[in-house]
Image: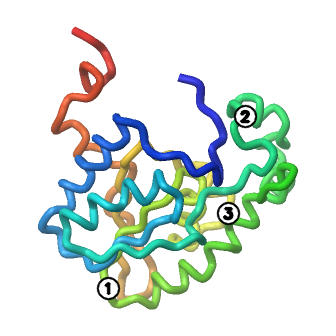
Amino acid sequence: MEQRAQGHTDIPLDEEGILQADMLGHSFAGVGIDRVLSSDLKRSVQTAEPIAKYSGARLDVDKRLRERSFGNWEGLPFDEFRHRSPSPERMEELFAFRPPGGESFKDVWVRLDPVVHELRRSEIDSVVVTHGGSCALLLAKLLDAPYPTSRAFRFGNAAVVDLELRPDGMYTMLRYNDTSHLRSQVLSGGVDGSHR
């Protein structure tokens, strides 16, 4: 499977993604959440809808949770994208780099500021559904970590990260990149994609 930079390209989930989203939604049945906050891009909303459905929570859509825009480079294979970007060893340069017509990591970092502020002030339990890059930046911000920390986070499709807000205003990470809910049903032959 060739991985491409999707960014703001508004593509829907494929058949397997829809199944994974439904399995994710089932895992939130009976969990006491009040709101599901999702990026406005179709693939994110389609992931958020089953969570709202099975939990009974309201669904709010927020454009600020979108993935980084790759501008004129959207649709490029990630290998080509990485070849044209600054080296990860030059973190400051990579963080500030904007593809033509797109956003830098720094742009997304700043775009997420009001979302983080709202989540910290909120008195309701929320589930946030977003994209890999913006999720990594959001997680680093919520943990009060510097932006380079975001480079350490990777997420599987329909993975769950569970944070708990402590009385001191800091978050504790209870679960990271949990996809155990996807093991309850066989996908593409076997869980590992094999056909036995």
- Kindly indicate the quadrant of the structure image that contains residue 95: bottom right
Position of the C terminus, as image quadrant, is top left
The residue most toward the top is: 196
Circle 3 residues within 10 Å: few <14, some 14–19, many ≥20? some
Question: Of discs 3 and 1, which sits in the foreground?
Answer: 1
Nearer to me, 14 or 114 = 14
Which circle marks residue 124 in the picture? 1
Q: Tell me the residue that label 3 is attached to.
A: 147
Left or right: 108, with 54 as reference point: right
Left or right: 4, with 138 as reference point: right
Q: Secondary structure at mark 1?
A: loop
Circle 2 residues within 10 Å: few <14, some 14–19, many ≥20? some
Q: Which amino acid, mark 1? A: Ile
Q: Secondary structure at mark 2?
A: loop
Please name the residue shown 41% across and 37% down the image: 14
Horizontal and vertical percent for residue 53? Answer: 22, 65
Please name the residue shown 52% across and 65% down the image: 40
State which tag comes first along the sequence, 1 or 2.
Answer: 2
Nearer to me, 173 or 158 = 158
State which tag comes first along the sequence, 3 or 2.
Answer: 2
Horizontal and vertical percent for residue 39? Answer: 51, 64
Please name the residue shown 52% across and 54% down the image: 131
Q: Which amino acid, mark 2? A: Leu
Q: Are marks 3 and 2 in contact (CB under 8 Å)?
A: no
Horizontal and vertical percent for residue 158? Answer: 37, 48
